Image (cartoon, coloured by chain):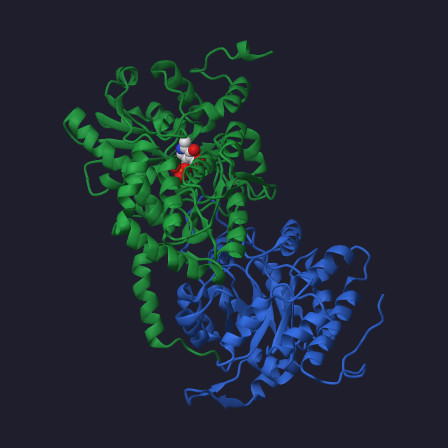
Amino acid sequence: MSDERRAERDSRETRTGSDDQERPVSDIEAAIRENDPALITYITAGDPSLEDTKEYVEALDRGGSDLIELGLPFSEPIAEGPTIQAAINRALDAGTTPQGFFELVDDLETEAPLLVMTYYNMILQYGTSEAHSASDSRAVEPRGKPDVRPFVERAAEVGLSGLIIPDLPAEEADPLREACDDHGLDLVFIVAPTTEGERLETIMSQVSGFAYVQARLGTTGARANVSGATHDSLERLSEFDVPKAVGFGVSEGDHAAEIIEAGADGVIVGSALVDIIAEHSSDGDAADRLEAKAAELKRGARRGAGEAVDAEDVPEPEQP
Amino acid sequence: MSKTTPDHDRDRNRERDSEATFGDYGGQYVPEALMPALQELEDAYERYVLNNEDGFMDEFRERMRDFGGRPTPLQRADRLSERYDREIYLKREDLVHGGAHKLNNALGQVLLAKYMGKERIIAETGAGQHGTATAMAAAHLDMPCEIYMGRTDINRQRPNVYRMRMNGAAVNPVTAGSGTLKEAINETMRDWATTVETTHYVIGSVVGPHPFPKMVRDFQAVISQEARKQIQEQAGRLPDTVVACAGGGSNTMGTFHEFVPDESVDLVAVEAGGSSLEIDEEANLAPNSATLSTGTDGVLHGAMTKLLQSEDGQIVESHSVSAGLDYAGVGPELSHLVATDRVTPASVDDDDALNGFHRLSNLEGIIPALESSHALGYIEEHTDDLGDLVVVNVSGRGDKDLETVLEETEKRDLEAAPDVEVFKE
Ligand SMILES: Cc1ncc(COP(=O)(O)O)c(C=O)c1O
C-alpha cells in the first residue's frame, strides 16, 4: 500500500456514528463518500498472470477507480457467470496461490483502497496451509482446524482494506467479522433483489464499508441494460444511511449514469473489464484499454450525478 | 473501523446455528440471493415434513407405496451368507421405482415444491439416478423439470440420459472441469440463483446448505425405518453391522438413521477408493472420492464438511469408476458422525467394487449399481470386521452401468468376472 494512503488513513477524522459513538470512517467508506459517485472496479488476480495483474490494477487506478476489488481465485465460483469463471480458470492454470496474491497486493501502490473478493473456503484454509508448508509435512497428515484469522491478519499486513465473500451470508459471518473488526478491515455484504423485510434490516445493521447492491438475480456478467431490480433495491435501501454501490451486469458509462441517477453512491464493474483482459492481454494493450474503460465508466457516473464532465476532470487516454 | 454486530444479532445467529449444523459441520454458505429461499424451504420442511401439515406426509407415503413400490424387501442373501459364514441381508433399494433409493428423496422434494407453490424443478445428477428419479417425480406430479449433468457422466450413463428425456425433462450438459457431479452442482446453483423465486432445486443427496441435509435424510430414513423393523421380524434381533456406500451419503444416512441410537450396531460408510488414496496436488486430482477417510474440513456447495482439497483450499477433481460416488464432498451429518466415532469410514477401490458387482450378479442374481458394489466389495475384503448379522444396502440396480462394467472389466484381470470376450462384436 502507498505511504501517501497510509498517512491519509492515519490522519482521517473520525465521524460520529448514528449510535453516537465515535468511530473512525473506514478507508472504504471514505473512498466512496469522498468520491461520490464512486467507481469500483474488479479484476481477477493472476489472470493471465500476477505480473499482468499489477499492471492492470495500476491502469484501473489511473483511470479513476475509487476502490479496486481483486479476485483471489477459487475453483468453485458459484456466484460467477461465464466471464469471471473463465478468468478464475486462467488464473488457477497460471498457478495463482494466496501467497502470490498477498505478495502482489503488498507490492501495489494505488490511490484507491483495495478489497479482496474470494470464497469462504479460501479464507478458512489459509491458516492450515501456512502451518502446513511451514512444517513441510505430507498431504495425508492431519492438519489444523480451519481458521479465518491468519488470512485476515495477512490481509491487514499487506494493506487490504476489506473483504467481499459472496458465499458468506450474514448468518455465518460472526467469526470473520470479529477478525475483521480486530484488524480494522471492512467485511462487505451483498444485498440481493430477494433481500427484504427483517433480513434487510439485519444485514443493513451489520454493513461495514458499503452495501453491495446486487443489481439483478443470478450470477455476475456484463449485460446490455440496467435491470429494473436495481431501482427497486435502491428504493428499499433509501432509508438506510450507508454508502450503496450497485454491481452485477454494469458494463457501460450509460449504465453507470442510470444507476447513479437512481440514487446509488457508486457502481461496481467486473465482467466488462475481465472481457477486455480476455481479449487483449496477448496484444499488450489491455492496460490502456482498462484505463480508458474506467475513465468512461467514471464519466458516466458523474453524468448520472448531474456533474458537468469535461476532459480535464477525468483523464481520457487515447483509444489504442 | 467497522461497526460491531449488535448483541441481539449474534445471539440470534448462535441460536440458529444449533439447528443448522451437526457439531462443527453444516450451515448455509450460499450467495445472499438464495438465503430467503432457504428460509422459505426451512419453514415448509417444518410444517409439511415434520408436522404433516395438510397431510403432506400421508400423501408422500401413499405415493411412495403406489408409485414408488415401497416397502422394499430385506432379503436374506443365501449364497453370500454361506460364503462369508454369517448372516447377510440385503436391503433391496434397487427395487424402488426408477431403480435406486433416489426416488425417496426426489418424490418427497418435488411434492414439497408443489405444496410450496413452486412452478419449476431443477436438479443436478452424477450417475443419472437422481436425475432420473427427479424427472419421474416431476412427470408424475406434472411439474416442468431441467437436469444438469456433467459431460463425462452423460457419456458413461447414457441409459439414464434417455430415461430423463423420455420422462419429459431437459438435460443440460455441463462441460466445466472434469464434467462430473461437482460441476453439475455448481451449474444448478447458478440456475437457482437466477430463478429462485419460482424454482425449487431438488438437491440429490444429504449435501448442500441447511435444511437440505436434514430434509433429504428424513426422506431417505424410510430405508432404515423399514430395515430395522424387518431385521427384527426376520432375524429376531438388531444387526451387528450395517454397511452402505457413500457418495454424498444419502443412502448411507437413510440406511443408518434409525440405527444411530442403537450403540451395539456398527455403521460402516464405504467410499470410492478409486485407483489410489493419495491426492496428486500437481495434477489437482484425487484418483478417489474417499472424502470421509482422507478429506479435510472446509466449505463446499453451501456446507462446512469434509472435502478433497489442496493445501490452498482449491477443490480437487475426484475419481471413481462409479459416477454416483465421484464427488469431492460428502454430507455434513456423515462428517459429524465420523468425527464423533459413530460411523466408521472405509474405502474400496475400483477393482474390488467391480468384483463386488460381478459377485452379486453371479451368486445372487442381482445386478447392483456400481455405487452399491462398493458396499459389496467391502464385505468381501473386510469379512473379519463384520459381526454375525449384517445388513448391506443395495442402493440401486446396475442396468445403467453395464457398458462401463464391460469396458472396465476388459481392462483388468478380475477374479469374480465372467468371460466378457463374448460381448465383443
Ligand atoms: C445407486 C446409487 N447409490 C448410491 C449413490 C450415491 O449417492 P448417495 O451417497 O447420496 O446415496 C448414487 C448416486 O447417484 C446411486 O445412483
Q: Quadrant of ligand 1?
A: top left
- Looking at the image, residue A123 sits to the left or right of residue B42; the answer is right
Q: Which residue in the rendered view is the most extreme toward the front?
A: B142
Using the image, determine if residue B118 lies above or below residue A5.
above
- Looking at the image, residue B102 sits to the left or right of residue A315; the answer is left
> Residue shown at 48%/53% (left/top)?
A132
Q: Which residue in the rendered view is the most extreme toward the left?
A: B236
Shown in blue, the chain is A
Using the image, determine if residue A256 lies above or below residue B67.
below
| Residue A63 at x, y percent in the picture | 74, 74
| Residue B241 at x, y percent in the picture | 25, 31
Shown in green, the chain is B
Q: Is residue B120 visible?
A: yes
Q: Observer-nearest residue: B364 or A69?
A: B364
| Residue A124 at x, y percent in the picture | 46, 59
Using the image, determine if residue A86 lies above or below residue B174.
below
Q: Observer-nearest residue: A69 or B184?
A: B184
